[in-house]
């Protein structure tokens, strides 16, 4: 991260000099005035220089894109990464990958895509106080997987209700477990919870005990 | 493969100049010995080894493409 402290006769002068040194425009900078500075008496006695701290604003979306591009270059895989603007906001950055080698990028049940997504989120959140959720999609994979998981959840909930036994799912990532919990949250017949340690944590679906068992 | 591990490691640690990757060729597999600054060990391993696991998963994907077995060994300095 580029950051410098700069002195100048006035605040304005100090800022201008700092921007020049960093080689950036004002809109890409965070500016903090440390010392206002004063002209002193007749501009001679007691004059004090202004001091500012200028920091280059980090473009988090760009940081992520650059990391992903370099990663695919080194893999090496031909892939195109773009930001999905309508899904990107103050809390979340959403990328989509297009590639001929989508199968490799996604991996078994999305394990490679999840790993790359996690590493990208570490890189993006490395030097920030705020936190961005990073989502990496590959030509609609996330939505397709969500539909599959919801279908599975519905089927297994039926099984739990009809057999009265708990049903255990395969180990899944936190995001995937969340999809199952959310989907069955409004089903009054079952409860869902997770058990085990990462990365083997799994969802269980159980028939809800009825209170009026006469 | 070595460059891939080096690039990922450098992107997530603080002391990038302390990142070293040494490639050891075995008969059927390649071992990549990765070492980082002591203070960065946590950043490369993660809680319950989550970061190390993610690195290995990505390397595995690259290795499968090349038809090789690659082991990432994280070492202390």
Image (cartoon, helix red, strand yellow):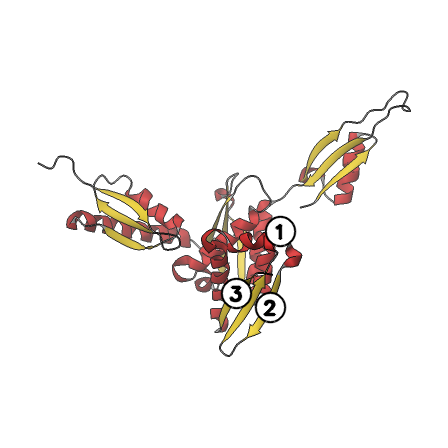
Q: Is residue A138 visible?
A: no
Residues behind callouts 1 and 3 on a single chain: yes
Query: Circles 3 and 2: CB distance less than 8 Å?
Result: no
Instruction: For marks 3 and 2, give the CA distance.
Output: 10 Å
Q: Earlier in the sequence, mark 1 or mark 2?
A: 1
Residues behind callouts 1 and 2 on a single chain: yes
* Residue of label 1: B14
Parent chain of label 1 = B
Query: Circles 1 and 3: CB distance less than 8 Å?
Result: no
Tell whether B47 sits left or right of A15: left
Which element is circle 3 on? strand
Q: Answer with the quarter of the image where residue A58 lies.
A: top right
Q: Answer with the quarter of the image where residue A66 lies.
A: bottom right
Which element is circle 1 on? loop
Q: Alpha-carbon neighbours of circle 3 within 10 Å: few (<14), some, or many (≥20)?
A: some
* Residue of label 3: B73
Q: Position of residue A160 (x, y in %)?
A: 20, 49
Instruction: For marks 1 and 2, give the CA distance.
Output: 20 Å
Parent chain of label 3 = B
Q: Earlier in the sequence, mark 1 or mark 3?
A: 1
């Amino acid at each position: 991260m580029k950051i410098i402290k700069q002195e100048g006769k006035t605040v304005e002068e100090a800022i201008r000099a700092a921007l020049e040194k960093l080689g950036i425009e004002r809109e890409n900078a965070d500016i903090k005035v440390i010392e206002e500075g004063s002209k002193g008496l007749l501009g001679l006695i007691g004059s004090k220089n202004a001091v500012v701290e200028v920091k280059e604003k980090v473009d988090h979306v760009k940081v992520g894109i650059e990391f992903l591009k370099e990663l695919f270059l080194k893999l090496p895989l031909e892939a195109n990464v773009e930001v999905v603007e309508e899904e990107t906001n103050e809390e979340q950055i959403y990328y989509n990958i297009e590639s001929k080698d989508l199968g490799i990028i996604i991996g078994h049940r999305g394990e490679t895509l999840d790993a790359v997504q996690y590493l990208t989120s570490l890189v993006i959140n490395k030097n920030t106080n705020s936190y961005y959720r990073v989502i990496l999609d590959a030509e609609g994979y996330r939505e397709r997987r969500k539909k599959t998981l919801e279908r599975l959840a519905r089927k297994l909930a039926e099984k739990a209700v009809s057999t009265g036994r708990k049903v255990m799912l395969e180990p899944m990532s936190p995001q995937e477990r969340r999809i199952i919990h959310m989907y069955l949250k409004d089903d009054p017949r079952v409860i869902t919870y997770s058990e085990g340690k990462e990365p083997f944590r799994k969802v269980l679906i159980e028939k809800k005990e009825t209170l009026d068992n006469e | 493969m070595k460059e891939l591990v080096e690039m990922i490691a450098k992107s997530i640690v603080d002391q990038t100049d302390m990142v070293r990757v040494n490639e050891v060729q075995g008969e059927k597999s390649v071992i990549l010995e990765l070492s980082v600054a002591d203070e960065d060990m946590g950043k490369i391993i993660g809680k319950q080894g989550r970061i190390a696991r993610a690195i290995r998963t990505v390397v595995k994907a690259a290795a499968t493409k090349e038809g090789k077995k690659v082991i990432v060994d994280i070492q202390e300095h």
